[in-house]
Image (cartoon, rainbow, N blue to C red):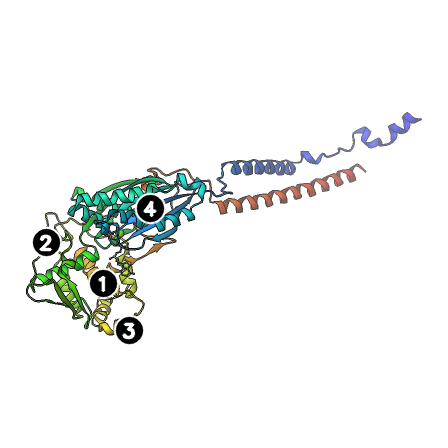
Amino acid sequence: MNQSSSQTAFPQAEEGKVKVKNPWYRPVVIFLAAVITMGIIIMVAISVVQYKPLHQKYKYGIVLDAGSSHTSVFIYEWPAEKENNTGMVRQKHTCNVKGKGISSYSNNPKGAGASLQECMQEAKQKIPTHRHHETPVYLGATAGMRLLKMENEEASENVLDSVAHSLKGYPFSYQGARIITGQEEGAFGWITVNYLSENLRKPTGTLGALDLGGASTQITFVPQQEIESHDNSINFRLYGNDYHLYTHSFLCYGKDQVLKLSMGKKLESTLKDDVLRDPCFHPGFNFTRTVQSVFNTPCMKEVKMANENFFHLGLGDWSQCQQSIRKVFNTSFCPYSRCSFNGVFQPSVDGDFGAFSAFFFVMDFLNLTSDTLAGTKQKLATYCSTPWKKMTENHPNTKEKYLSEYCFSATYILTLLEDGYKFTSDNWKDIRFIKKIGDSDAGWTLGYMLNMTNMIPAEAPDTPLMPYGGYVTFMLLFSLLILLLLLLAYMYFRRSTRTAQKDII
Ligand SMILES: O=P(O)(O)OP(=O)(O)OP(=O)(O)OC[C@H]1O[C@@H](n2cnc3c(O)ncnc32)[C@H](O)[C@@H]1O
Ligand SMILES: [Ca+2]
């Protein structure tokens, strides 16, 4: 009885008339299962390959720019894992050392080292203590120290020893204090602006670099023409690209030295007179100066004057001012196919330029950063003719020294760019007067540090599969897709099971 009832419970099935469909064998389910498995494998693989900076660890570097007019301390920071990627290093902090540049301490070398104290203490506070010992610190001195070395080599060595001794007293990793060459100054300025503009890993053009300091000026760019003089040529291989740069640094052509040169030339022509009538200063400007304050530079031979002092009177005549400034450029000889001035080879300027340091300070103060060349000249002529009294009334908070010199400085900038470097009214718009790119100052210091720490590799480094933001979005969308597929599979499975059960019943 038992046996027969069990045998007759599902007679059709027993006889094999109805096939029960196993939903797992259906192609759709197999396909879904395959997609899900693949998805999981891809996600795991990407997670492993993808660089995930969850805990950013920063590294730091310090560069002291010991310029002719002042010293600045720059602190840079970058994510430790990404130091070979372009655009990763940014300026964290900058500190201006009080007082003049280190070359002014030639008679008191100890004072040069001592002057750095305040800013270096600040650096200690800005950089986390556990990073101090591995933070490199470099000091690079520019034209002021080049001139001091020409005048008095021993004094320049004493000053460098003093700053070196001072820097070694901090917990950072001291890497040296030296006078950098004009070529380095130009080339590292070029690297800085192109690194910050992220031009170095793109096939797009690069940005030329124009730097105007107190004692020297640099021009650096990738020329179209061949570079005819070896001294002006620098080659780099950066991120897998070759760059052939033209660079020149004009010592004595920073704006403070050119002011001395041009005043010296005017004084020479008025040997016995104790009045210097200067078209580059505002009408009504009247200042007593010592002759020595003009000739205290190796950039010029001293001229014996009848008096020790002279009266510096302003005339405010832009066009006469430009004529007087032209006299500091010697264009009478050129041993190459073309020259800027003083017999220096220069290919024709090409592409966009970033003009920084005093190019920016001066043109920005005068609101002349976005005019045409003709417009700039016109505005400058009006500016120079403004009476000195009115100038001081309109700008009570501007340093009088700067205020009195803007007319001269801007006229020099125009003359240097147009007559010297041969910019024209057509390509004037290609000059961008800039101070910073992003958070970081344009200048040679960042490029110098990137070079010294080998942070710009010759060949392009391996990069993560995709940027971090893209990675997160990808993973999110992929997870959602997998969830959806799982849901679909589940629903399909349930439906199939029900249908199968119905079929059986
Ligand atoms: O490169 P070198 O020639 O060694 O000189 P530097 O590094 O000291 O030169 P800077 O670029 O710091 O400054 C260039 C000149 O601009 C002057 N300067 C700085 N700030 C200025 C401002 O706000 N307005 C006008 N001039 C300024 C400064 O005194 C210098 O004469
Ligand atoms: Ca400088």
Q: Residues within 10 Å of mark 3 (few under 14, many from 20)?
A: few
Q: Which residue is mark 3?
A: 393
Question: Which mark, residue 410?
Answer: 1
User: Would the CB of label 1 be found within 8 Å of ligand 1?
Assistant: no
Residue 397 lies, in percent from the top left, at 32, 67
Question: Which mark, residue 140?
Answer: none
Decide which of 174, 209 is in the foreground and name it.
Answer: 174
Query: For residue 24, what is the image quadrant?
Result: top right
Q: Label 4, label 3: how many angstroms apart (C-alpha)?
A: 39 Å
Q: For the residue marked with disc 4, what is the amino acid?
A: Val
Which is more N-terminal, label 3 or label 4?
A: 4
Which is more N-terminal, label 2 or label 4?
A: 4
Q: Is residue 248 above or below residue 390?
A: above
Q: Quadrant of the N terminus?
A: top right
> Could you tell me if the residues under marks 1 and 2 are in contact, i.e. CB atoms within 8 Å?
no
Q: Label 1, label 3: how many angstroms apart (C-alpha)?
A: 21 Å
Which residue is depicted at the point 19% across and 52% down?
348
Q: Label 2, label 3: how many angstroms apart (C-alpha)?
A: 38 Å
Q: Residues within 10 Å of mark 4 (few under 14, many from 20)?
A: many
Q: For the residue marked with disc 1, what is the amino acid?
A: Ala
Which is more N-terminal, label 3 or label 1?
A: 3
Question: Which mark, residue 301?
Answer: 2
Tell me the element at label 3. helix
Q: For the residue marked with disc 2, what is the amino acid?
A: Lys
Residue 66 lies, in percent from the top left, at 28, 49
User: Would the CB of label 4 be found within 8 Å of ligand 2?
Assistant: no
Q: Which residue is mark 4?
A: 63
> Could you tell me if the residues under marks 1 and 4 are in contact, i.e. CB atoms within 8 Å?
no
> Could you tell me if the residues under marks 4 and 2 are in contact, i.e. CB atoms within 8 Å?
no
